[in-house]
Image (cartoon, rainbow, N blue to C red):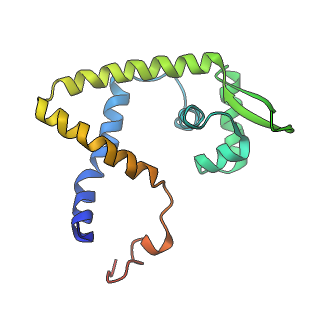
Amino acid sequence: MSFDESLQLSRELRPMLPRLYHLSRRRIPGWDLTTSQSSAMSTLVDRGPLRMSELAALEGVQLPSATSVVNGLVKLGLVERRADPADRRAVVIDLTPKGRRQVDELVDRRNHSFALLLDRLDEQDRRLLEDAVPAVARLLSLGPDMPEADQPGNRPGTDD
């Protein structure tokens, strides 16, 4: 696939992704958390216990912002601070059993709701989506950081 074909695919696919995400969230809203709190919870689900500096880096925020988000989650009983087993002087943030339970319940409800939508597609469309899952997983594994040479305007032969 040429870069121009990839660019066209991006123009078609990228706008659909947030809409798909919001469709899933709107059908089964979560509990009353801010976007930042929800994101931090998701990061802890994906990564497990983290130091505050690691959480801040993964969330793309400054340490005071991450601390504020975590303080709110601690007050709600969804996350806890505890000594880092690797370095007792440091603290790690992790989900509490209550936080894990709430995340698991919400994920189950959203998966069920999304499955009802998928069930409304014909078999061929469901198979196409199923076949796309490995490619989407690989795309997500590339991460948010693009090498400087790949930024728009820095690609050889383009005038972006």
Please tell me in which quadrant of the rendered image residue 76 appears: top right
Quadrant, the N terminus: bottom left
The mark tally for this picture is: 0
The outermost residue toward the right is: 89
Q: Position of residue 102 (x, y in %)?
A: 54, 18
Q: Position of residue 40 (x, y in %)?
A: 59, 36
Q: Is residue 77 left or right of residue 134?
A: right
Quadrant, the C terminus: bottom left
Q: Is residue 139 left or right of residue 144?
A: left
Q: Position of residue 95 (x, y in %)?
A: 64, 26
Q: Position of residue 106 (x, y in %)?
A: 45, 20
Seen at 30% across and 25% down, the residue is 114
Please tell me in which quadrant of the rendered image residue 88 appears: top right
Would you place residue 45 above or below residue 139 in this image? above
Q: Nearer the viewer, residue 78 or 90?
A: 90
Seen at 59% across and 38% down, the residue is 47
Seen at 25% across and 36% down, the residue is 130
